[in-house]
Amino acid sequence: MNYRHGYHAGNFADVLKHVALVMLLRLLTSKDKKLFVLDTHAGAGGYDLASSVAQRTGEAEAGILRLVSAGRQGMPEAVACYLDAVSAYDRKFGPPGARLHRYPGSPRLVRAALRPGDRLVACELHPQDGLALKREFAGDRAVEVRQADGYHALKALLPPPERRGLILIDPPFEAPDEFEQLARALRHGLRRFATGCYAIWYPIKDDAAAAFVSGLGDLKLVVLELNLGSSVTPGKLAACGLAVINPPWKFEEAMREALPWIAARLGPGVTAAIHVRPTTSTAPASPA
Ligand SMILES: C[S@@+](CC[C@H](N)C(=O)[O-])C[C@H]1O[C@@H](n2cnc3c(N)ncnc32)[C@H](O)[C@@H]1O
């Protein structure tokens, strides 16, 4: 296991995933019923954007930091909610400065949205990041951190007693057969908990991504994609997607508003697309 999310925190892939995650949480917690969240590949919890690892790639510069400096005028609600969550996390470490210093990972964004009685289980297999995650949530009774395989958690923890759940699956895609492992684990999860909302992040590099999405069959689906275009250094990730199974009402609408705005702020040539199934429309997200 070589992947460390600290190198990539706040990049364009995190922006896509986390804007959607914050909106999913907002919609799912608007109902007066308890929510269970499973974060199968949780990472370290929070990241220092001034650290040498973050500085080495500079990926946040082309992601969250572009949005932070974009100005709030005309900003879609989903982006505003995301930026509020990011700056609330940053403010825990000191007064806000001109520049964002700390970036919240998915478990931190989830935790900030939980109400009393909701709970999060966060799995992280890497020994150092697993330890950091345990420290991040030490003493927090709403959060259980497991240094364990997140794919197994889909079998072990579903269905949750709450009967309402959001499952974020965000693997590092280091293993050549990651899409196969993911599809297998997802099948197990869906068999146990068909009504859960599942958000699955994936890189788009070749036909494997499209094959994975088409393999989701006739599930109710909103698929979000962000593509940085041809300006990306060869060998670097240029496009990614997030497939959301059983999306809550109004999620598609919020993403149709947010994605083109984000793409326009991330730079020239950046494009966003939304695909919905069952097919009501398959169209590029409209320009901002
Ligand atoms: C893309 S990062 C997660 C980022 C995090 N979800 C976020 O949005 O802030 C993927 C993480 O999965 C961890 N990991 C890899 N294989 C795993 C597995 N089978 N179960 C749990 N965690 C795993 C890696 O160590 C890495 O920290």
Image: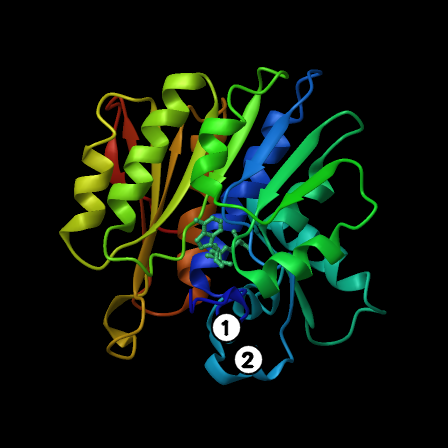
* Secondary structure of the residue carrying numbered label 2: helix
What is the x, y in percent for residue 117?
A: 77, 25
Tell me the residue that label 1 is attached to.
7
Image-based side of 98 in relation to 226, left or right: right
* Secondary structure of the residue carrying numbered label 1: helix
Mark number, residue 53: 2
Residue at horizontal 52 percent and vertical 54 percent from the top: 125
Q: In front: 151, or 271?
A: 151
Asked if disc 2 is less than 8 Å from ligand 1, the answer is no
Q: Is residue 262 above or below residue 7?
A: above
Residue type, numbered disc 1 = Tyr
Q: In this view, does 219 lie above or below 228?
A: above
- The quarter of the picture where the N terminus appears is bottom left
Residue at horizontal 23 percent and vertical 72 percent from the top: 230
Image quadrant in which you'd find residue 22: top right
Image-based side of 151 in relation to 138, left or right: left
Residue at horizontal 60 percent and vertical 33 percent from the top: 37
Residue at horizontal 24 percent and vertical 37 percent from the top: 213
Residue type, numbered disc 2 = Val
The reply to whether callout 1 and callout 2 are in contact (CB within 8 Å) is: yes
